[in-house]
Amino acid sequence: MSEINPTLVSRYFEGVKTSILGPYMMDGYGFPNSAGDYRFKAETQIVESLLNGVDRDGAVLDLGCGVGYWAEAFAQEFSSVVAVEGSANLYDALVTRCLPYPNIQSVHSNVLRFQPKGDFSLTFLGGLLMYLDEDDVVGLLGNLKKHLKPGGIILCRESTVRGDTLSLTGDYSVVYRSIENYRRIFKNSGLAVRVIEQNEPYVLLQMGCELMDKWKALTPKPFQMLPLMGRLAYWGLRAMNPWILNVPKTFETPFPILENHFFVLEAIDQTE
Ligand SMILES: C[S@@+](CC[C@H](N)C(=O)[O-])C[C@H]1O[C@@H](n2cnc3c(N)ncnc32)[C@H](O)[C@@H]1O
């Protein structure tokens, strides 16, 4: 059974804003753009530690790269980057962002139809697998595995749930899987999980998104004052960071509903 409606996924991403908040799903809450910058910078520090030992002389493949913030960061560290994006809207912004970087090749394509050329030290999937059916994930990862350089890794950053898989239907089509479910899928794709790390900056801002969702549901539109309330929520959470992240664990509250994890994967035969 299909978990994902690809038409709805592409319609959604054709409509998002090309700011840093858009592809991060943080638009419409009244957060300042600096919230996106904060999340990106904090995530780059986590990624930097996860890339320890990865050959910087090699190439990077960034699939579902959005407007290219990550592609730009990788281009400054690795020899070259192939950045693939399916939305024409985001692809145009990607091309503009990458103009100063002759070592980035931008490709407008569905990742399921894209055939990589050559081998990569790093393949980055930043929030992509949650828009693909399980069969497609297994097929895609199995193919990407064949294009890993010796010692190369696949790094995924995916939104996750604590319990059963949650598929959203309606205008926004997405599937949120548990860590255990991803472990099974990665194994079926011939990949070993080297590291799983919680994406704390995501979780912090997801608390803000879910609080603002509640505020929007309870407050009539004319009284929502999103630019004010979104900024209050954002700066309040920043002020309470990092101890606020322990609150759900301490009180065993499933809040926020969504979490997010980095998964470092390598070819199974490489670990044997
Ligand atoms: C959550 S956004 C993440 C963007 C970027 N990786 C980042 O971390 O900022 C997911 C991206 O994947 C792209 N995408 C989703 N499904 C795709 C597909 N089948 N082919 C190509 N791109 C896809 C979307 O257009 C969107 O840009």
Image (tube, grey):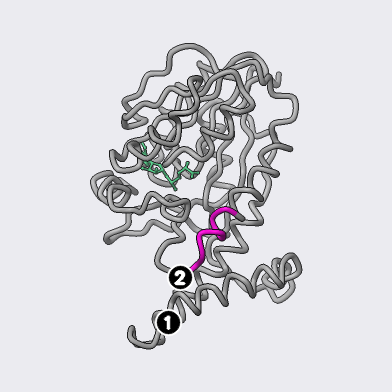
Q: Ligand 1 closer than 8 Å to the CB at disc 1?
A: no
* In this rendering, position of residue 252 left or right of residue 175: right
Q: Is residue 198 left or right of residue 109?
A: right
Residue under circle 1?
225
Instruction: Give amino acid for label 2.
Output: Gly
Image point (57%, 53%), residue name: 37
Which residue is more in the foreground, 137 or 240? 240
Q: Is residue 217 found left or right of 80 in the rendered image?
A: left
Seen at 64% across and 75% down, the residue is: 236
- Quarter of the image that includes the C terminus: top right
Which type of secondary structure does the marked residue at label 1 adopt? loop
Give whichever of 218, 192 is nearer the camera.
Answer: 218
How many neighbours does mark 1 have within 10 angstroms: few (below 14), some (14-19), or many (20 or more)?
A: few
Magenta segment, prevailing SS (helix, strand or loop): helix
Question: Where does residue 240 sit, x and y in percent of width and height?
Answer: 71, 72
The stretch in magenta equals: 31-37
Height in image: 40 above or below 235?
Answer: above
Q: Is mark 2 within 8 Å of ligand 1?
A: no
Check contact, mark 2 vs mark 1: CB within 8 A: yes
Let me know if residue 33 is in the magenta part.
Answer: yes
Look at the image and tell me whether residue 219 can be seen: yes
Q: Which residue is mark 2?
A: 30
Q: Is residue 143 left or right of residue 38?
A: left
Residue 55 vs residue 37, the one in the foreground: 37
- Compute the Cα span from label 2 to label 1: 8 Å
